[in-house]
Amino acid sequence: MAELSYVLKESSKYSECVESLKETSKDTNNNEYLCKSSMEVYDFDCIVKKLYPLKQPSSYDSLIIDEDKKMVYCIEFKNQIPSQINNANIKKKLTNGKEVLDNICTNENVQKKDYKFIYCVVHKPVHNRYGNPLVDRETKFELKVYKGTHFDEIVTNDINFFKNEFKKEFKKEGC
């Protein structure tokens, strides 16, 4: 059985889609980056464009794969506060992106059951002096129903939370 990161890095279909986390976090409309990390990740939008050159399904921005822990982080960056984010769009990225990823695993002989898949929606922080840490931990964008069916975990939180978790998980600065 193949490892997902090996398939993506070594296959001529996907090898051009290795990019920095910084580049995959770019908001092209505003020319802003949500992350500054040079860590190599898989540009999932690029992968989807290669697989579906004529009409692309919706997809998330980045894949971070930790083969040691068998974790696959599917990350969607939104340079918006939660109230400005379109729930239907986020759901479509989750479902379409996971279908594409599942197809890659099937076609490349990668055992999905060996991995834990985590969908992350990273957004701008809400500047609210009455911030409620319990609300911050809730799954936003009506995504709770996809936990257990499409993804093992779903995390929806702001860029500051992501930066802290990124440092803990990957022992790297700069996100």
Image (spheres, grey):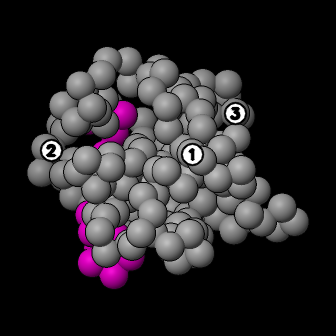
- What amino acid is at disc 1? Lys
Measure how far apart labels 1 and 3 are at the Cα level.
Answer: 25 Å
Residue at label 3?
28
Residue at 39 percent of width and 48 percent of height: 65
Mark 3 and mark 1 in contact (Cβ < 8 Å)? no
Quadrant that contains the N terminus: bottom left
Tell me the mark number nearer the camera, choosing from 1 and 3.
1
Image location (x, y in percent) of residue 58: 64, 64
Q: Secondary structure at mark 2?
A: loop
**Rendered view: 131 above or below 54:** above
Mark found first going from the N terminus, 2 or 1: 1
**Rendered view: 25 above or below 135:** above
Residue at label 2?
132
- What amino acid is at disc 3? Thr
Of residues 159 and 13, the one drawn nearer to the viewer in this rendering: 13
- What amino acid is at disc 2? Asn
Mark found first going from the N terminus, 1 or 3: 1
Residue at 27 percent of width and 78 percent of height: 148
Image location (x, y in percent) of residue 79: 52, 37
Quadrant that contains the C terminus: top left
Q: Give the residues in magenta.
A: 147-161
Residue at 40 percent of width and 63 percent of height: 141
